[in-house]
Image (spheres, rainbow, N blue to C red):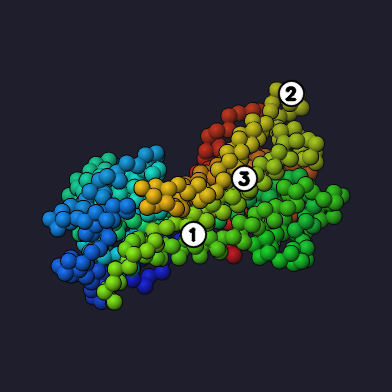
Amino acid sequence: MTKITIKQDSYISIEQVCDVATGVLQVKLSEEEAYKELIKSGPKFIEKLLNEDGVVYGVTTGYGDSCTVEILPELIDELPLHLTRYHGCGLGRYLSSEQATAVMFARLVSLSKGYSGVTLDLIELLTSMINLQILPQIPEEGSVGASGDLTPLSYIAGALVGERKVEWQDKLLLAKEAFAANNLAPIKLKPKEGLAVMNGTAVMTGLACLAYQRAEYVSKLATRLTAMASLAMKGNANHFDEYLFNVKPHQGQQKVAARIRTDLNYERHPSRNSERLQDRYSIRCAPHVIGVLEDAMPLFRTFIENELNSSNDNPIIDTEHEKVLHGGHFYGGHIAFAMDSMKNAIANIADLLDRQLALMVDTRYNNGLPSNLSGASKERASINHGFKAVQISVSAWTAEALKHTMPASVFSRSTECHNQDKVSMGTIATRDCLRVLELTEQVVAAQILASYQALSIRLNKNELEKSSWSDEVTNFYQQIEEFFAPVGEDRALEDDLRNFVMKIQNREWNLYEE
């Protein structure tokens, strides 16, 4: 299997995090002696400070508001273990295997920069856990996003010492048992190591990488489905004219319009001379809605990848100048902003597709399609309801997605005796974003089936000519056809919807390879 080498100057991309999370890539630490010596220099410097009676936050002092509490020399070695234990209070669902791997890799990338004072043994064990898929059970709730993701990351730190439950080969067991089965041994945390593993932004950042990739795919699917909805309702393709979009040159918006032009086979589109002067906004303004996300994605990438490739714990160990620098790099404000913004743009796409479906099922607006997209014969039309209930469910999923768009970052709470008196809520923002993506993917799945249904009705009535379609839409239609039969007589569509949600989340279709 292909491996990605990690060292101090590595720049890891969102895509590489996702590939590690899904098992496409494995991880390898640099074997350069200079790199190993860099990592070893951090613990050596901390040991030197201790021998010289130096004061180091979280090493010779308590944590947070307890930083004025002096730790007796004979208790220093126990302090990091206590940190992992008392933060073992997370609740909620456990992260999936993919999510847990992304989080572990994000933490590895940060620790491997050499500014955290951790040993080579710790980094090597964390690398082995990723590659062997020895995955801590990490509860998703309990982080305020500063002082980093303390509570969820304690489950990684606790696993490193052998104490927490992990999932390995579909079994749930103690970390030390999984280590033993793989000829590994738990580590004993050095004075700064508990803090280094836990006091960072790896949970929100690892999950943000997964969210980013899902958002990219949702944007492409929404664009393709807009083209199909326009075809199905005999829309006016002139709404996507290149000259029109040149006079309002948001690049992402232009990209979406160009994709729709390609999908509509614009130069040959039969409705370029449509009698309808203007389609409703959910069709006509689709590039303006989807384009907001497309234009924001480069900024989101910058925020996420900068955070990913940073040292984001506290304190920072500067071995070059022999300094311990106390700061606030655990603060997840950039991820919070990216995720709060992303969930807003994604929810707007859910709302867009919800409105498109509402048009397609309504005989007042769908330009001759049957009520509720029913494919039943005239004689049986009165008892068949096609996509009526699907449209209701789509409305429910959309409403829930929109409800989650309140920015999490504005709900900062003062915690921990007012030491953490301003916090980012970045992990909550990221979890919100993932939920909005999940709901939007459900909306997308429903719209895929509805668009296919509408186009199949048009084809059966000879109201559209497949020969006028673009290759892109034709191929996509045929790929849907492999797994979904048009709805004639009413039937339950839950299994079909779940199947297509899974296909969306697995990104099974190649879209817009630009």
Residue at 39% from the left image edge and 58% from the top image edge: 330
Q: Amino acid at mark 2?
A: Ser
Residue at 46% from the left image edge and 64% from the top image edge: 305
Q: What element does badge 2 sit on?
A: helix
**Mark 3 nearby-residue class (10 Å; few <14, some 14–19, many ≥20):** many
Residue at 37% from the left image edge and 72% from the top image edge: 9
Q: Residue under circle 3?
A: 350
In whole angstroms, how far apart are the C-alphas of marks 3 and 1? 24 Å
Q: Of label 3 and label 1, which has the lower sequence position?
A: 1
Position of the N terminus by quadrant: bottom left
Q: Nearer the viewer, mark 1 or mark 2?
A: 1
Q: Circles 3 and 1: CB distance less than 8 Å?
A: no
State the mark number for residue 382: 2
37 or 233, which is in the foreground? 37
**Mark 1 nearby-residue class (10 Å; few <14, some 14–19, many ≥20):** some
211 or 320, which is in the foreground? 320
Most extreme residue toward the left, as rendered?
Answer: 74
Q: Residue under circle 1?
A: 334
Q: Position of residue 79 (x, y in %)?
A: 21, 53
In whole angstroms, how far apart are the C-alphas of marks 2 and 3? 30 Å
